[in-house]
Amino acid sequence: MSKQHTSSRKTRKIAAIAAGALVVGLGATYTLATWNDSEWVWGGADGGPGIGTERFDVEQFTEGAWHDDETNPGGALDFTTAALALTPGDTVYAPMSLRTKTNSIGGSVELQGAVAAAGVAVEDAGNELWDAVALSVYTSADATAPSCSAAAVTAGDWTAVPGIGSSPLGTGATPGTGAQTLAAATTTDPGAPQHYCFVIALPDDAQQVAESAGVDLQGRTIAPAWEFAAESD
């Protein structure tokens, strides 16, 4: 083999090695870089928010209309004027109802003990009349409320609220024993109502008992208020 040919082969070999070294060198350089491609997600569906809270909203039917009254004294129970003219042995009745508002989930409600109505002036020093009257409360889940009357109560159209039954006015339902259901509403209609019938009586012997303690119940006034504590399911 000629010297020239040998030299040519060495030249090509060196060139090939050099080229290989160059490729390796470039490859090592590019492995230090990366392509970036981020992906995002969000909590939503159909173009709107995908996370939110349910609504629990209750309203009452008193004074001839459905409305909200979330602070004491709230809506007025209509015992009629007879409630201001009680004599021993008299009983007065007043209806009211509760329901969930449109778009509300369901829940339960418990009647709490009577407290003084905020901002209402009364004449009952010593709370003697307050302690003398007896309270009963009845409930019904019928689509239409039964008559809130002695006849309907006697006929069994109403069910007594547990924890309240001819009890002193200041005694309310014991938490956990007197809950009623508030049905869930729909997107177009309120929930089915839960009805109540409040019954207040002045016992036959109320004046005699009071007089034995040196108290006269005549001419006194009281203004009890009740909270319906509602809780969502």
Image (tube, rainbow, N blue to C red):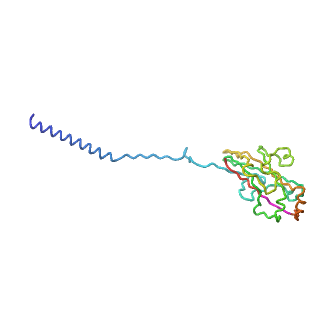
Q: In x, y percent, where is residue 67? A: 73, 53
Question: Can residue 114 be found in the magenta stretch?
Answer: no
Number of numbered tags placed on the structure image:
0
Name the image quarter holding residue 25.
Answer: top left
Relative to 57, is 221 on the left or the right?
A: right
Residue lying farthest to the front in this orientation: 212
Relative to 25, is 98 on the left or the right?
A: right
Q: In x, y percent, where is residue 150? A: 86, 48
Question: Which residue is rendered at x = 15% and y = 40% of the image?
Answer: 11
Front-lying residue, 205 or 97: 205
Relative to 18, is 138 on the left or the right?
A: right
Question: Can residue 221 be found in the magenta stretch?
Answer: yes
Q: Mostly what secondary structure, the magenta segment? A: loop
Name the image quarter holding residue 90.
Answer: bottom right
Question: Which residue is rendered at x = 23% and y = 43% of the image?
Answer: 21
Q: In which quarter of the image is the N terminus?
A: top left
Residue lying farthest to the top in this orientation: 1
Q: In x, y percent, where is residue 34? A: 36, 46
Magenta range is 220-224
Question: Which residue is rendered at x = 15% and y = 39% of the image?
Answer: 10
Using the image, determine if residue 1 lies above or below residue 154. above
Front-lying residue, 129 or 52: 129
Front-lying residue, 226 or 27: 226
Q: In x, y percent, where is residue 173? A: 76, 52
